Image (cartoon, rainbow, N blue to C red):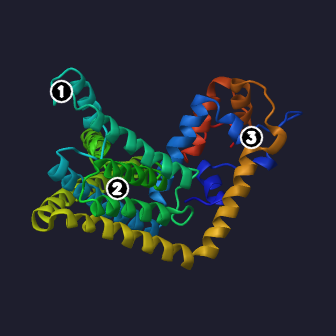
Amino acid sequence: WLKSQEILLVLNLQPLRSLTMDQSKPVPLAEALTNTAVRNAVLENVQRSVVLNLPTREKVGMHLIGIVLSVCAGAANAIAFATFKYYVSHVSGSSTAIGLRMEGLQKPGDVLIVVELVFYFIVGSVIAGLIIPSATMKMGQARYELVLFLVAAMELVCWMHNLRYPEMLAAAMGLQNAMISSWSGNAVRTTHMTGTATDMGSALGRICARYCMKGFNYTDEDWDLHIVDRQKFVLMTCLLVSFIVGGDIGARGYRSFGVHSLFIPASLTIILGIGHMIYSMVNKEEMAQEKKAEEIFARQLSGGDAGEDSGDDSAAEQFIRQISGGGAKADRVEQFVRQISGKPADAGIGG
């Protein structure tokens, strides 16, 4: 979501090609990132900036898509369990069931069906990877509508065969989950709520801990962290509630319409696919320009032919010297962290 110049502002860096050092070759960011300290500092601040600077359109779109797909997954999972007594939207239970059935503690001799559920969930994820080649994080930058249509098609195939094939629903859920994780950069999952509940709880814990230690006497950085955790807590809560609502919708639908209840998640998924297709067509020119800018900036980060092997530590130190203007070796990583965090530099160290 960040354009090239916005990323430079986030990192508080001048363009890499303008950085020079006495008789030293500039170290590109890509090479400097092989150092753990540099990588962690950059990653933390970029992730925070993505949340704080996400356009309202993108934010609303991500919430809406996550909520609708969570409802669809909850409904499909409830319908599958009502029909087969198996959950299809995740693999944890099925993986455990394999061991239980192998030891005769759960339906002895019926191991193949749960193995197939796990296998087809993975197959669905593989299909998503074939269609979406990279973990892009922007609407319209990949064929998400094709994946959504395939999810709906798999659900309708299961409906056409009177819900006789739970494996097809498992593949649909694997396809959907891989698609939304690529769409959101692994920030959102919709077919299982374990990670969602974990993120929700950890965000709430950080909010409470920050308040207990500082009250509301927050620095600017504290407020940024608070906003990030608050937004994560709200999003994860919405996803969890949506999955529960979807389960109730699926159960009520199955009780009222039987096999035809699969039209509920299938139709919602088709509507999302059509919506994304329209969005991509309307914003085609804008997205093409942003994608081109991102590709250019990615080449700048890699430094072209500048990435000669000079050792991870020396490359990181050279890069830190470039952005800090020198300084004692012991202070370089700390100075770098202060710079990308937007904190003032210590006296006597170049900025």
Above or below for 192 versus 286: above
Of labels 3 and 1, earlier in sequence is: 3
Marking on residue 108: 1
In this view, the residue farthest toward the right is: 23
- The picture places residue 164, in percent across and down from the top left corner, at 25, 53
Q: Quadrant of the C terminus?
A: top right
Comparing 256 with 44, the one in front is: 256
Q: Amino acid at mark 1?
A: Pro
Q: CA distance from mark 3 to mark 2?
A: 33 Å
Residue at 32 percent of width and 70 percent of height: 267
Comparing 296 with 118, the one in front is: 118
Q: Which residue is mark 2?
A: 231
User: Could you tell me if residue 188 is visible in this image?
Assistant: no
Residue at 49 percent of width and 55 percent of height: 50
Above or below for 105 versus 76: above
Q: CA distance from mark 3 to mark 1?
A: 59 Å
Of labels 1 and 2, earlier in sequence is: 1
Disc 2, SS = helix
Viewer-side label of 1, 2: 1
Disc 1, SS = loop
Please state if 200 lies on the left or on the right of 182 as rendered: left
Q: Which residue is mark 3?
A: 28
